[in-house]
Image: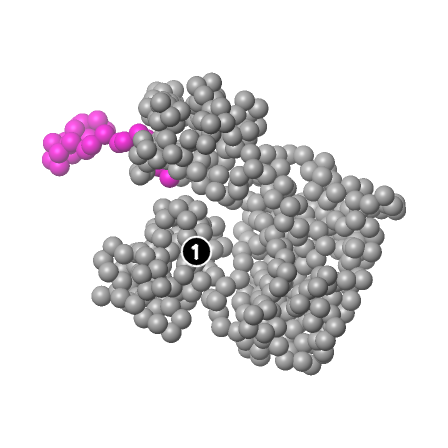
Amino acid sequence: MTDKPSLAAWYDEKYGKKPAPSLFEQLGGEAAVNAAVDIFYRKVLNDERINRFFEDVDMDKQAAKQKAFLTMAFGGPHHYTGLDMRRGHARLVEQGLDDSHFDAVVENLAATLTELGVPAGLIGQVAAIAESTRNDVLGR
Amino acid sequence: MTTLRYQQQSFELKAGQSVLDCLAGHGVPVPHSCRAGVCQTCLMRATAGNPPAASQAGLKDSLKLANYFLACVCEPKTDLTVALPDDAQSSIHAIVRKLELLNHDIMRVELETSLPLYYRAGQFINLVHDSIHVRSYSIASVPRLDKHIQLHVRRLPQGRVSGWIHEELQIGQNIEIRGPAGDCIYVPGKSEQALLLIGTGSGLAPLYGILRDALDRGHSGPIRLFHGSRDLHGLYLIDELRELERRFPNFAYYPCLSGANVPPGYTSGRVHEAALRETPALKGWRVFLCGHPDMVKITRKKAFLAGASMQDIQADAFNVSHA
């Protein structure tokens, strides 16, 4: 008698336990980022609380930045350092970027994932990664 | 050992070295910015060999098919011959077959090339006046429908090349062209998708090509064309577009006039405003924007906010050089 769990257990025994999929894999990798970037960026541009920080910028460059941000928040491969975050947002902090704006971005991120049908547990993990950048983004 | 070829030169690529770093190291200027495969500033094209898939990530399908890649993240394992997007093909000769004024300042130029030119309506070619003065013009013709390559050249004040075309070019004259290039084209395969075409002035050229390409390929989804100018004499091909509208029930033509005098049968207002008023929800639509750079920039954002996916917005801004 072999059902699926026992077969999986047999393979685990035979080849060693398969590593648990990363957050990025569970979310669907680059394809998930591509699906999310349109929805997320549109939400941000429509959000009166924060869209002034995204005005007057080249749309291609802005979209590329959103994509890089989402890749990082999804636990994907990225090369951001805390210093990059500080440098990249310093001008915006001068313009008044603060916790309330950071909260709004995280809110839009969570709403995007909800819209894409991502389970709440994974959304929490993404929000936690985004949260970990807060002090660098706000230059503290 | 991997060899990189650019123009007439050959360079050896070190392990793990990108095409961008290799070329820059040999003094070849390649525009670049992010060095992370994101910003697409360092877009190049392989004219022989295949760029690795990783160097094409994020590019639109039409660019991938044409072997475009991003030089900063391109680490080829096999030999590659590369070109910057605008010198991808050496120039070829063309004979001027027809010159016809479409309105007071736009000339239809028809060209026959000495060798067959494989192009898609909506791409552009570069027309060479002399070594310094080269101008890009969008292609209005469709290979299956039109005998010759067709351009719509607007005469610009002090325009070196457009002035030459309007005043000196003769039928039968031999000229030099480069290209084609560009990815503002109709991509077959989604014949039910709704298409929104918005253009100002001679920005109609690529749209007129894309429209007829789509109709000829049996596109079944709605197609809306908004062509705008300040007053009536800035528009052109009105009768032909109205005729296409009668023949194809899925096609609607909106000639738009932003000036005060708007006769019946014309839409009042600026072209992008009229288009978004008539088509406020763009989720699932494919949008083509051609013409004035400001119009293109504004409308791109508005179309995106109206629900069009970024991948589904094709923009062709007519930047004017004043040399």
Q: Which type of secondary structure does the marked residue at label 1 adopt?
A: loop
Quarter of the image for residue A18 reads: top left
Quarter of the image for residue B258 reads: top right
Give the magenta range. Answer: A1-30
Query: Depth check: B137 or A100 in front?
Result: A100
Q: Does residue A6 appear to the left or right of B259 in the view shown?
A: left
Q: Is residue A123 above or below residue B72?
A: above
Number of marks in picture: 1
- Residues packed near mark 1 inside 10 Å, few (<14), some (14 to 19) or many (20 plus): some
Q: Is residue B52 magenta?
A: no
Q: Does residue B121 appear to the left or right of B30 in the view shown?
A: right
Query: Depth check: B277 or A99 in front?
Result: A99
Identified at 72% across, 78% down, the residue is B170
Q: Position of residue B174 (x, y in %)?
A: 63, 80
Identified at 42% across, 31% down, the residue is A89
Q: Is residue B84 above or below residue B219?
A: below
